[in-house]
Image (cartoon, grey):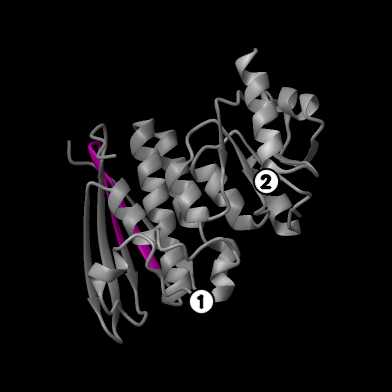
Amino acid sequence: MTVSEAAKALNMKILAGGDKTSLSRDIRHIYTGDLLSWVMAKASEGDAWFTVMGNINALAVASLADCACIILVENAVLDANAKEKADSISMPVLQTGRRAAEMIIELDTLMKTE
Amino acid sequence: MSSSISLHFDVSGDDFTRAGEASTQVKKTLKKIGYDSDAIRRVAIAMYEGEINMVIHAGGGTADVEIYPDRVDIVLTDEGPGIEDVEKAMTAGFSTAPDNVRSLGFGAGMGLPNIEKYTDSMRIETEIGVGTKMFLSVNAGGSNS
């Protein structure tokens, strides 16, 4: 499932970093966590990363760990400089008002029934 | 083949928003020359942790990177307070980072353990009140994680 398909299916807003290439990237796995060092060590390439961290450091982590996208849950805010960074490195940042747990279950189900 | 690429970076000490610039740059360079992707990831993670450490604890520093065909050597140098107990600092979960840093998502006590995990060799020279020098090396093709 691509980032844009996931955004559509789960009714998520695309806040930044969404261009044709970045949105057509495949989500391979799902990861969640808010401690950046922890995430950087454990997240894998192509992850959809669910978090509440919308700061510029989260963008660096997502980029270095090669995540497919960042998904901000419970309407967590994307900082202005983080938005700028997301656009410049084409890292899609999506947002939802719902909780991480619900979203992950739904995305996982969708990915399995693909 | 003995040719190598040398890169030098100044890591600003007061600016969390710029941490990651050096590691991002190195990642880009390695990608461009077609380096092994696992090695790129390990170099990027180890360097980013090193950068963050210098920003949090040492008021910045420098990063010198030497890219060889078969390995990447990284030297991180700072003039910070030094590490009192290196063994303790290497323990996962141990952190002396202040609260404002934790609220940014750091300070989980994963920095040095992550660096050790993702590099093939790691050596720390540190002196209280003088600074810390970290020598890291990542082999291309030979994953240790």
Q: Nearer the viewer, mark 2 or mark 1?
A: 1
- In this view, the residue in front, B106 or A61, is B106
Indicate yes or no whether the magenta region holds residue B71.
yes
Q: Give the Cα separation between the discs numbered 2 and 1.
A: 27 Å
If the image is split into quadrants, where does the N terminus of chain A sit? top right
Q: Position of residue B115 (x, y in %)?
A: 33, 54
- What residue type is disc 2 on? Ala
- What residue type is disc 1 on? Pro
Q: Position of residue A82 (x, y in %)?
A: 69, 54
Residue shown at 46% from the left, 51% from the top: A38
If the image is split into quadrants, where does the C terminus of chain A sit? top right
Q: Secondary structure at mark 2?
A: helix
Q: Is residue B139 above or below residue B104?
A: above
Few, some or many residues within 10 Å of mark 1 (<14, 14–19, 20+): few
Disc 1: which residue = B98
Disc 2: which residue = A86
Q: Secondary structure at mark 1?
A: loop
**Subunit under mark 1:** B
* Magenta extent: B62-75
Q: Are marks 2 and 1 on the same chain?
A: no
- Left or right: B99 as drawn, with respect to A70: left
Does the magenta stretch mainly form a helix, a strand or a loop? strand
- Left or right: B106 as drawn, with respect to A15: left
**Subunit under mark 2:** A
Q: Is residue A111 above or below residue A18?
A: above
Residue shown at 41% from the left, 70% from the top: B95
Q: Are marks 2 and 1 in contact (CB under 8 Å)?
A: no
User: Is residue B24 visible to the viewer in this orientation of the structure?
Assistant: no
